[in-house]
Image (spheres, grey):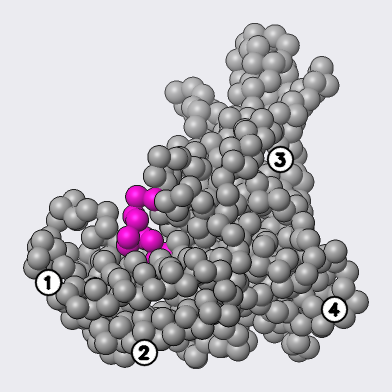
Amino acid sequence: MAIIGIDLGTTNSLVSIWKHAKATIIPNVIGDSLTPSVVSLDDNGDILVGQAAKERLITHPNATASLFKRHMGTKKSIDLGARSFLPEDLASFVLRSLKADAEAYLGETVTEAVISVPAYFNDAQRKATQTAGHLAGLQVERLINEPTAAAIAYGLHEEEEKTFLVFDLGGGTFDVSVLELFDGVMEVNATAGDNTLGGEDFTSLLVNGFLNHHNIENTSLNKKQINKLHQQAESAKCTLTRYNTAKLTLEIDDHIYHWDINNTQFEKSAQALLTRLRLPIERALNDASIKPADLSSVILVGGATRMPLIRKLVSRMFGHFPACHHNPDEVVALGTAIQAGLKARDKTLQEVVLTDICPYTLGTEIMVLKAHGAESGHFKPIIERNTVVPVSKVERFYSCHDNQEKVEVGIFQGESRRTKDNIELGMINIDIPKGPAGSEAIDIRFTYDINGILEVIVSVISTQKTCTEIIEGHPGALSKEEIASRMALLAELKIHPREKMENRTLIARGERLYEESLGDIRQYIAKLLADFESIVEQQDANEIAKARTDIEKHFCHIESERL
């Protein structure tokens, strides 16, 4: 049975397979390799995923959600119409859609997958990704860091030894990894990143620039207007990739606002974001004890790396142009396919030994003796960042107070010496026998696996009591009962039939164009849609396909006239 590879992205997602001795991107139902990570609740209660949902961001903003990957690992509630969903619920709909595309392509049922995650995803975000896979009916065989997946795709046919850096700027996250390839071993030396920095932040920069230029308050716009402006900004960002200037246009209360911007202005406004990109690069190089001149190449990953200002930044920092052997949108998905092939022990793949690392320092809270007495809130690292995984380390600690009956073991992630400045992952409480301060000892074992999942076990030395309740109260982890409840809830919802998705996507596109148009063009679009819906009702597949092709040409012409 095939194991598929999935790149679950903030903006777009892809599914892939290792087949016939190569990694292949599987097209979705409308023939595209990229499936927008957008979910919408249709008027009849069906779930729409992908391009059809993306079209409804404008026409049905209160029933459509995007960018939910940024909230993975939290209990944030996202409303679609009258229903509420968790981020992993929405991610599971995207995964179900990708799973269906793979099954249609392969002609067999798919139950196993390798899913990529940002290298800087924390424990909660990784567990949420696994939960999303479970809700989608997939057994997640492996979570693989996105830069590592890209490195596998890049290094598959490389035979010479080399050290390279993967610069991965996706829609919502930024990762940078330094890797070394030698004797069939792919070794990750260092990883750094920013989970709140991505291509969407550059889009937001254009949105804010437009609003500031016209002295318009964001709060004065409704959700539909905000989504329209965001779409304009996204289009302008793509235009600036190909040309030097772009224009944003938005109608507010019968008044049309315009704003022109060029690449020089865009780069100047983005200096704060570019500085944020430099910091993780410098940290990764420092941790790997490597100078920019020592790198064989720099690999660009993620659609946001197409922006000229990003390529200029990389060229300035490393003194040479980045490598562009693969499509930056697809390289991670290709790497997940290769990892899936390795997992399935495909005979056409030569064995690649892959080592990965823990991207964060993980530790606990301790008390430190000072002149005025003991002070709590200090961070004690147990697993240092960039330690090769899988890894298991144990540290022994002693009671702090006379007649102490309980120990609270805080579990933290971060690089600050104070726990208040790090991220609390959880808390484990364990009872200890009463006695003088320092007479009772506990061992705290941290185990970090290849999927980036942390397990913590606390043992009392004198009683041999072991606490196996791992990271209880974790803010992003669902219990088995909660997962069962979410599965029951989601089972009630129907995914729009795959075989009808092309038609539904075209109608959603037409509805968006209708809302964006005025006068005769609007009436023309309405007639095209009405005629198409009449043909769909007749259920003649050949006539539907013919009409769909014809109307797509009309829609493309209408959109091109606006450029």
Please state which amino acid type lies under the numbered disc 2. Arg
User: Farthest residue toward the right?
Assistant: 347
Tell me the distance, in whole angstroms, between the alpha carbons under discs 4 and 2: 38 Å
Q: Which residue is mark 2?
A: 242
**Tag of residue 55:** none
Which element carries disc 2, helix, strand or loop? helix
Q: Which residue is mark 3?
A: 455
Q: Residues within 10 Å of mark 2 (few under 14, many from 20)?
A: few
Which element carries disc 1, helix, strand or loop? strand
Tell me the distance, in whole angstroms, between the alpha carbons under discs 3 and 4: 32 Å
Residue 296 place in picture, x, y as percent? 62, 87
Please state which amino acid type lies under the numbered disc 4. Leu
Which of label 1 and label 2 is nearer to you? 1
Tell me the distance, in whole angstroms, between the alpha carbons under discs 2 and 3: 47 Å
**Residue at x 56% of width, y 69% of height:** 539
Residue range in magenta is 54-63
Q: Are marks 4 and 2 in contact (CB under 8 Å)?
A: no
**Tag of residue 256:** 1
Residue 87 place in picture, x, y as percent? 51, 47
